[in-house]
Image: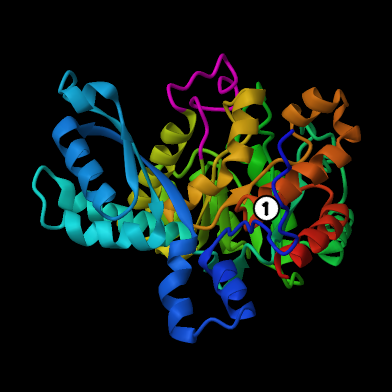
Amino acid sequence: MKKPLPLNRKMRIIEIKNPQEAKKVMRDINVDAYGVKIMAPKAVTCLIRINSLSNIAANILKQEMLSLGGDVAIARGALTGAVKKGDCLIMGNLAQLEKLKDKLQRQPFGLGPIGAGLSLAAANYQKNSFDFICGRYKMKLSCRHTRLMGIVNLTPDSFSQDGISHLSLAEVEKKAQGLIDDGADILDFGGESTRPGAKAVSLKEELRRVIPAIKRIAKRSRVPISVDTYKPEVARQALDNGASIVNDITGLRSAGMRKIAADYKAGVIIMHMKGDNPRNMQKDPVYQSLLDEIIGYLRQAVETAVSCGISRNRIVIDPGIGFGKTKEHNLEILNRLKEFKVIGQPILAGVSRKAFIGKLIKAPVRERLSGTIASCVLAAENGAQILRVHDVKQVKQALRIADAVNNI
């Protein structure tokens, strides 16, 4: 019999998530400060996918990355010249990617812009802290301290069964204040249900539901107020009456909405939704490449918003879990949420009481608290700086544990 290999009891494998963690480990073993600066980027590896690259560019990219100690996976057809275009996967650490950028600047076949894009993507991916400016508020958003957006549903037909359109203004105010006391950092007021298949509400009715409540509560609220609407006139009147954020499920597709947000210097939440509206979004949603399509959509929506005068520090993105996605789509988004960091904007995730949770744990809406908490903690761990929730107190308690662990 062969003797078992000796076990080194002083050896362990360390998982490094970002350069900050790498620096901490190096400082623990008393690495020189200059050495820490040089070596920390070498400890963080990345996989970067580039779609539809010419086979010539892909082969040059592979050779350049090999010369730096990394590699690039490309299709067999790109190696042989059998295909003209294909996707590739760059494998390397942050230090190698920065050197690759410089090498690509000297290459033809459109590789210069690709190098600059790689550098920006790596920088965005490492960014964990943002200043979110909305009206008169400036909020620090960080993966180390997850913010909560408390939901105030002023509807009779909300999927979450917590609509309070039947309550008096005084009772609505009490509900809102309760969310703040429980730990809400933002209040989100909505006057039209956006559950799958929900019927549209007239402009007049939506205004009747939300404007008096926002006007009353904004006078006393110490947190920013968001209005959940895709109607420009509702957004305008809400902003006139104290709201400072527009949460638009249609991703600011309306030029009128973009102008209002820019004119009022409001914060905006740009969400992805498959389909034109909640009535058809869940009709057999199909994606060729789920993450590519949603990231592409959100990236373009952000650039359009910026071109219309909305500054980047006023923009939050939301991949739209539950909006034109199957259960499997939602799980993939939640699992790969960090990939949205490449856009360079803070991320909001809305998983609270969603149908995919009910399907997984076989529970009606009112019995999805445990599933909601688990999903929220995972979303925060995977890159969300803001979580939109119904059960603020319980989620806040869970996140205190998660944030404490991440801040070690």
The image shows residue 160, relative to residue 198, as above or below, that is below
**Residue 322, visible in the rendered structure:** no
Residue reaching furthest to the front: 1
Residue reaching furthest to the top: 284
The image shows residue 225, relative to residue 2, as above or below, that is below
Count the marks: how many?
Answer: 1
Residue that carries the numbered disc 1 in the rendered image: 381
Q: Is residue 280 magenta?
A: yes
Which residue is painted at 50% across and 18% down in the image? 286
Which residue is painted at 57% across and 62% down in the image? 240
Rendered location of residue 41, percent (x, y): 44, 66
In what quadrant of the picture does the C terminus appear?
bottom right
Rendered location of residue 114, percent (x, y): 23, 49
Badge 1: residue crowd in 10 Å (few <14, some 14–19, many ≥20) = many
Mark 1 secondary-structure assignment: helix
Out of 348 and 144, give the one closest to the viewer. 144
Which residue is painted at 78% across and 67% down in the image? 404
Rendered location of residue 102, percent (x, y): 21, 62
**Residue 117, visible in the rendered structure:** yes
Out of 214 and 287, give the one closest to the viewer. 287
Mark 1: amino acid:
Glu
Instruction: Determine the main secondary structure of the stretch shown in magenta.
Output: loop
Q: Is residue 357 left or right of residue 111?
A: right
Q: Is residue 298 left or right of residue 108?
A: right
Out of 387 and 18, give the one closest to the viewer. 18
What's drawn in magenta, residue-wise? Answer: 272-289
The image shows residue 23, relative to residue 89, as above or below, that is below
In what quadrant of the picture does the N terminus appear?
top right
